[in-house]
Amino acid sequence: EPEVTQTPSHQVTQMGQEVILRCVPISNHLYFYWYRQILGQKVEFLVSFYNNEISEKSEIFDDQFSVERPDGSNFTLKIRSTKLEDSAMYFCASSELGAREFGYTFGSGTRLTVV
Amino acid sequence: TQLLEQSPQFLSIQEGENLTVYCNSSSVFSSLQWYRQEPGEGPVLLVTVVTGGEVKKLKRLTFQFGDARKDSSLHITAAQPGDTGLYLCAGGRYGGATNKLIFGTGTLLAVQP
């Protein structure tokens, strides 16, 4: 069964450093997303990406965050200057279309720890 | 801000018991999805319901979407230890181009053998 692949599975970084989280969505999917889940809290929407541009972003997704789909297969989330409160599980997801009806396929996540 | 509240927050039951998890909101959603998440993994889609009053069954799991499309329930019959996990409901909004989902607060289920 097709799956969404995320790397690395764990990342530890120092506060103020830049991190790039990588995702390979399912190949025929059209919509791509990043969500995060702080330990013990609910899954929160960060950003959605369609047709090579951001289609919606949350208030969490400030100027320190950016996304790219550099080569038609990878989908990356960059945090320019990490803060302690960025520590969380970051999930990439993709959907073929109409996620309201068909749902997402999530990756296994990257656990980011900022120290 | 649209919120989806799940209840109960935690549930510990014995194998063979039945249970119901509720997902409630004051907002209308065009669809309601249920996911299960295991520790260290991403959520896995169980079902999508799109029509008010719709009922879907997945083996021992029964999902219902409220008539007004503001709430949903998940009923598990004869729970098994393999059902243990975090159950998340997620609502899809009307309109918009992004297919963003709003996730619920989660119900952590532990089924004891």
Image (tube, rainbow, N blue to C red):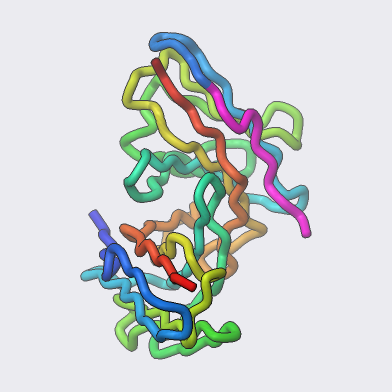
- Which residue is pictured at 62% across the width and 46% down the height? A107
Quadrant assignment, res B45: bottom right
Query: Which residue is depicted at the point 44% across and 70% down?
Result: B112
Q: Residue at x 47, y 37 (%)?
A: A89
Quarter of the figure that contains the N terminus of chain B: bottom left
What is the quadrant of residue A8 in the picture?
top right
Front residue of B24/B100: it is: B24
On screen, B66 above or below A89?
below
Please state if B96 lies on the left or on the right of A52 as rendered: left
Give the side of residue A25 with respect to residue A10, left or right: right
Is B1 in the magenta? Answer: no
Residue B108 vertical placement versus B81 (above, below)? above
Check residue A3 for magenta coloring.
yes
Give the percent coordinates (x, y) of residue B16: 47, 85
Residue B14 is situated, as x and y percent measured from the top left of the image, at: 41, 77
Q: Indicate the position of residue B62 as horizontal and vertical percent values.
A: 48, 85
